[in-house]
Amino acid sequence: MTDKIYPIGQLPKIGEIPELMYAATLRKNKYGEPKKAFTIEKVPVPVIGKNEVLIAVMAAGVNYDGVWAALGKPVDIIKQNQRKGYKEEYQICGSDASGIVWKIGEKVTNVKIGDEVVISCGVWNINAKDFSKSKTPMESNSSGIWGYDTNYGSFAQFSLVKDFQCYSKPKHLSWEESSAYMLTGATAYRQLMGFSPNIVSKNTPVLIWGGAGGLGSMAIQITAALKGKPIAVVSSKEKEEYCKKIGAIGTINRKKYSHWGRLPNINNEIEMNKWTISAKKILSEFQTILKDNLRPMIVFEHSGEDTIPTSVFMCGTGGMIVICGGTSGYNADVDLRYLWVKQKRLQGSHFANPSDCEGINHLVKEKKIKPMISKIYKFNEIGVAHQKLKDNKNHPGQMTIQVGSKK
Ligand SMILES: NC(=O)c1ccc[n+]([C@@H]2O[C@H](COP(=O)([O-])OP(=O)(O)OC[C@H]3O[C@@H](n4cnc5c(N)ncnc54)[C@H](OP(=O)(O)O)[C@@H]3O)[C@@H](O)[C@H]2O)c1
């Protein structure tokens, strides 16, 4: 341990650990709009436990959980994490990273110092009573998201991870490219492949909301790689072009429609009819693109309140609406008649299990999926990048932050 601190972009000799590091922190008194919430400060480098690994972060992907954390809503994560035993008054977010293994705990056997890795954000307690590695660790009550439900995420020079979070970095990718696919890629992979029998196979029609976003870009590429038929919904011409470029067989511009949000009062026949006509139009646009009168058998959801009523309406008989987020709100209406009569499944999903992480890493290594980086930001622009995400002003693809990779 040395008391030196290194500038962003400079690493000590491999294995040498400075006492302090630069980190982008959140503190309770700064919760609010992301552009103002993150502060760069010097903090101690975390101490690792027996099954933990210290990572020198080379690049850190930007994801929506940093937005929620900065806002302090819907969860005050500093309070939540202190309740779990963290002593720090600050939170270091960041749930995606590429980096170098810098130190390993005494029980770690799967990686060694110097290994180049990408980090999966799924964390759980392997000693929890309900934990089962062979089944679905994300369904253990001990599971959470590194950098959100735990401190010492990737927006710092060093990060603290469990050994099982480390996956080998695809050799053909840059640090920045490899820093920004695991969270969205594995989440999308589980949504599309984790809930049998509703999984993507040849010709499965899939409706993907937010096709040009982090999750959507991955969902399009995964569906295409598995020979399904991805059709994306987006909000601009630029995003339509982008989705087609990465494998969508067609796109729908949601700006043409206005029936979003909560359903009208079910007893108001005129309003309900207006709603249904609009929902039928979007279904018809979907079927025109598909050149078939089939409905989507998987609806890839994360937009939430604005879109769930349409998702439930459009989904095919026996199909699945699979949701992992609520960007537009959580108070979504479901017309239960569509759900039960056509035996549809409304399935929740949260990040991914190790098999999903391996699945996405394999597709990336095989070059069947290309991480799409929209912009590389500097370390002092972490707040700006999250603000873009919150305001839906980011360019198609995924944003990332240079940390150790800064030239
Ligand atoms: N549970 C999990 O494990 C997990 C993992 C990853 C992400 N998430 C959640 O999933 C959500 C999306 O994440 P992301 O990384 O893909 O974000 P992103 O890159 O910002 O993409 C989201 C996309 O959603 C679309 N969108 C925004 N508001 C919408 C609305 N009112 N109606 C329809 N579409 C809308 C936007 O596309 P257009 O404007 O082009 O339509 C945007 O590109 C976030 O809420 C995030 O917290 C959850």
Image: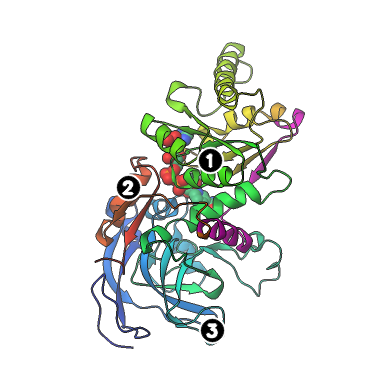
- Badge 3: few (under 14), some or many (20 or more) residues near its Cα, within 10 Å? few
Which of the image's four quarters has the N terminus? bottom left
Residue drawn at x 31%, y 84% is 13
Q: Which amino acid lies under the numbered mark 2 shown in the image of this protein?
A: Gln
Q: Which amino acid lies under the numbered mark 1 shown in the image of this protein?
A: Tyr
Q: Mark 3: is the Cβ under 8 angstroms from ligand 1?
A: no
**Mark 2–mark 3 CB contact (< 8 Å):** no
Q: Closer to the camera, 184 or 132?
A: 184
Q: Which residues are magenta?
A: 339-364
Task: Write down the quadrant of residue 338 in the picture.
Answer: top right
Look at the numbered disc 2 and give the secondary structure of its residue: helix
Q: Give the residue number, with chain letter if any, for mark 1.
A: 330
Image location (x, y in percent) of residue 377: 28, 55
**Mark 3–mark 1 CB contact (< 8 Å):** no
Q: Closer to the camera, 365 or 352?
A: 365
Which of the image's four quarters has the C terminus? bottom left
Q: Give the residue number, with chain letter if any, for mark 2.
A: 387
Look at the numbered disc 1 and give the secondary structure of its residue: loop
Residue drawn at x 67%, y 43% is 201
Q: Which label belongs to residue 50?
A: 3
Q: Which amino acid lies under the numbered mark 3 shown in the image of this protein?
A: Lys
The numbered mark, 2 or 3, whose residue comes first in the sequence reads 3
The numbered mark, 3 or 1, whose residue comes first in the sequence reads 3
- Badge 2: few (under 14), some or many (20 or more) residues near its Cα, within 10 Å? many
Image location (x, y in percent) of residue 70: 37, 54
Would residue 353 be counted in the magenta stretch? yes
Is 96 rendered above or below residue 368? below
Q: CA distance from mark 3 to mark 1?
A: 39 Å
Residue drawn at x 29%, y 88% is 2
